[in-house]
Amino acid sequence: MEIIDTLMGVDVNTISIILNGEQIIGSPNTNITQIGNGYRIRYTSPERLLGQINVIIDAADMKNPPNVMPTETYYFI
């Protein structure tokens, strides 16, 4: 997934991705790469994910005070 802000750029310290109730940012299974005005995040689950997969994403830009994105919520079955 990519999180991008075309004006100020994304503050990497504000990125939060919760997968089935667990924060995956900071996990050894998560890779964050800076791109343009944002970041590409790749997560490889250490185990097979079964059933409904819930994802919650939050982030803010580099502006002072920051613009905070509305929380994005997804689920996969």
Image (cartoon, rainbow, N blue to C red):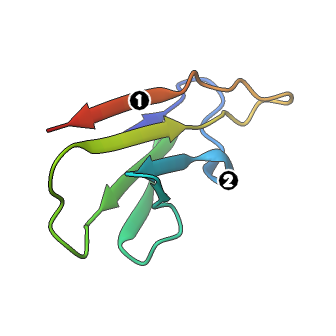
Furthest-front residue in this view: 51
Q: Secondary structure at mark 1?
A: strand
| Residue drawn 44% across the image and 61% down it | 32
| Residue drawn 59% across the image and 24% down it | 69
User: On residue 73, which mark appears?
Assistant: 1
Residue 39: x %, y % from top left? 46, 48
- Quarter occupied by the C terminus: top left
The reply to whether callout 1 and callout 2 are in contact (CB within 8 Å) is: no
- Number of marks: 2
Can residue 1 be seen here? no
Residue 62: x %, y % from top left? 72, 36
Residue 21: x %, y % from top left? 46, 52
Query: Residue type at mark 2?
Result: Asn
- Quarter occupied by the N terminus: top left
Q: Is residue 47 above or below residue 53?
A: below
Can residue 57 be seen here? yes
In front: mark 1 or mark 2?
Answer: 1
27 left or right of 13?
left
Comparing 26 with 6, the one in front is: 26
| Residue drawn 67% across the image and 33% down it | 61
Q: Secondary structure at mark 2?
A: helix
| Residue drawn 38% across the image and 50% down it | 40
Query: Residue type at mark 1?
Result: Thr
- Mark 2 — residue? 13
21 left or right of 53?
right
- Disc nearer the start of the sequence (1/2): 2
Q: Is residue 47 above or below residue 23?
A: below
Q: Estimate the spatial distance between the alpha carbons at disc 1 and disc 2, rounded to whole Å.
A: 19 Å
